[in-house]
């Protein structure tokens, strides 16, 4: 029975009761009975109002599906140590990031397409997110390609406070992953538990001290022609492995929580197996310094974040094995906010392995990195960031140069939609 019909019936009943009550009271002339009848009418009106409120609450309150457009522009004035004469203004990155939200606002679709001025496109993310699918309020399930939110401190947004990716993140978790990520909230949101089933990382290279549009970021094992190589976990899009058909599926997970309101710690794990193509690739590009012992690819990580007032301190470390080869690393960042518009960040990290270093293969060298970055907000969606990156290598005897010229200085200008 609809709300209006219920109201009409109840109103009719009330009127009949009132008429019979008046007739009775006129006959009996009893003021006490009249007062009781008025109280009953007031109680029935209250019940009608409660019934109407429940019906209104039960009715769906959906909004139409919506599409939102996001993105940003990143440009730099860069002065690399290797080629200071090539200092120039460059539009480093233009991102187009549309997002679709369902009528229930619990299903979302996102595509992040990045354009580089050298006429290349990169599909950074393409994913669907389902809210409240998992354990606890605030849980979500992510399907598709995006960053790995289930290992360490994801190097994006407010987590990567320096502009350049660090030596540590380049090695372990810079690249995106494809698969399913379940992000859960336990103990009323006090504990985060992330579990992912993803395509495993391939094995490739990255280089410190590079520009965003520099050819030095390509996956080739050059030695010290202005940069060095860092052995890195890479996604399938770089074309250096046959992840989609050769590698086994991989499990990645992180559990973390707040020890105090200011201090959060987390433990991460990663377990997978490398395919034959990746093992052959790593053996070839490491120049014989590496001989595969099995095909397991594992990582174990620890991370922490501390924020108190103007101070920020965060760090993480990983111990990994790539088919028997040990690759370990750590980094720590300290930040200070002078005011709402000015911040300073200092970050230091190291990466080492158990290979015998080869003079002509910089990926076998141990490395460290120091970054100093000053950020000035122009407004909420635009800022300038001045950054200098010092890169150091343990250069073995016989190398072409005792010091690689791969430090870099740049002023970045960033505008967000």
Image (spheres, helix red, strand yellow):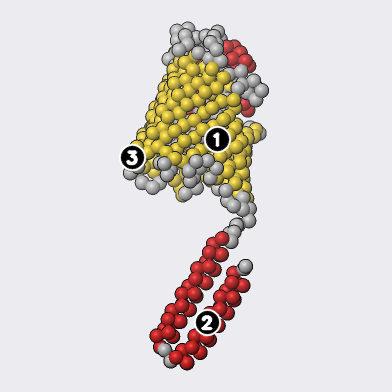
Task: State the image quarter where residue 308 is shown.
Answer: top left
Task: Name the residue carrying label 3.
Answer: 260
Q: Which mark is residue 17?
A: 2
Task: Name the residue carrying label 1.
Answer: 181
Give the residue drawn at x 60%, y 22%: 248
| Marks 2 and 3, how far apart at CA | 63 Å
Q: Secondary structure at mark 1?
A: strand
Front in this rendered view, residue 102 or 193: 193
Give the residue drawn at x 59%, y 14%: 279
The numbered mark, 1 or 2, whose residue comes first in the sequence reads 2
The numbered mark, 2 or 3, whose residue comes first in the sequence reads 2
Look at discs 2 and 3 and give the one toward the viewer: 2
Q: Which mark is residue 391?
A: none
> Total label count?
3
Q: In the picture, which quadrant includes the N terminus?
A: bottom right
Task: State the image quarter where residue 259 is shown.
Answer: top left
> Where is residue 405 shown, x and y percent of the image?
47, 20
Give the residue drawn at x 42%, y 44%: 188
> Where is residue 45 shown, x and y percent of the image?
49, 75
The crowding category of the residue bearing disc 3, from other C-alpha atoms within 10 Å (few below 14, some 14 to 19, many at least 20), is: few
| Marks 3 and 1, how far apart at CA | 27 Å
> Where is residue 131 shown, x and y percent of the image?
55, 45
The crowding category of the residue bearing disc 1, from other C-alpha atoms within 10 Å (few below 14, some 14 to 19, many at least 20), is: many
Q: Secondary structure at mark 2?
A: helix
């Amino acid at each position: 029975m609809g709300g209006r019909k219920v109201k009409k019936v109840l109103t009719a009943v009330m009127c009949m009761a009132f008429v019979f009550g008046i007739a009775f009271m006129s006959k009996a002339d009893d003021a006490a009975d009249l007062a009781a009848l008025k109280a009953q009418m007031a109680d029935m009106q209250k019940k009608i109002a409660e019934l109407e409120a429940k019906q209104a609450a039960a009715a769906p309150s959906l909004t139409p599906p919506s599409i939102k457009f996001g993105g940003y522009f990143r440009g730099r004035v860069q002065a690399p140590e290797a080629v200071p004469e090539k200092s120039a203004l460059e539009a480093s990155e233009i991102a187009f990031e549309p997002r679709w939200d369902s009528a229930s606002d619990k299903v979302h679709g996102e595509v992040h397409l990045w354009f580089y001025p050298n006429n290349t496109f990169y599909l950074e993310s393409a994913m669907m997110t389902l809210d409240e699918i998992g354990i606890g309020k605030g849980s979500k399930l992510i399907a598709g390609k995006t960053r790995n939110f289930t290992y360490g401190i994801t190097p994006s947004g407010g987590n990567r406070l320096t502009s350049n990716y660090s030596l540590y993140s380049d090695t372990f978790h810079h690249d995106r992953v494809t698969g399913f990520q379940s992000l859960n909230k336990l103990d009323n949101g006090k504990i985060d538990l992330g579990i992912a089933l993803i395509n495993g990382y391939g094995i490739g290279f990255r280089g410190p001290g590079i520009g965003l549009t520099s050819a030095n970021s390509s996956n080739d094992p050059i030695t010290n022609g202005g940069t060095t190589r860092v052995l890195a976990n890479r996604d399938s899009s770089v074309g250096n492995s046959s992840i989609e058909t050769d590698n086994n599926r991989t499990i990645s997970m992180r559990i973390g929580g707040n020890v105090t309101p200011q201090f959060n710690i987390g433990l991460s794990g990663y377990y997978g197996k490398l395919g034959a193509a990746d093992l052959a690739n790593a053996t070839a590009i490491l120049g014989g310094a590496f001989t595969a012992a099995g095909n397991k690819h594992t990582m174990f990580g620890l991370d922490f974040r501390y924020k108190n007032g103007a101070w920020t301190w965060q760090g993480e470390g990983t111990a990994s094995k790539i088919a028997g080869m040990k690759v370990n690393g750590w980094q720590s960042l300290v930040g200070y906010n002078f005011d709402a518009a000015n911040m300073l960040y200092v970050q230091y990290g190291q990466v080492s392995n158990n290979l015998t270093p080869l003079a002509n293969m910089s990926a076998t060298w141990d490395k460290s990195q120091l970054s100093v970055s000053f950020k000035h907000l122009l407004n909420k969606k635009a800022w300038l960031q001045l950054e200098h990156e010092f890169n150091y290598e343990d250069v073995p005897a016989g190398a072409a140069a005792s010091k690689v010229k791969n430090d870099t200085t740049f002023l970045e200008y960033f505008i967000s939609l």
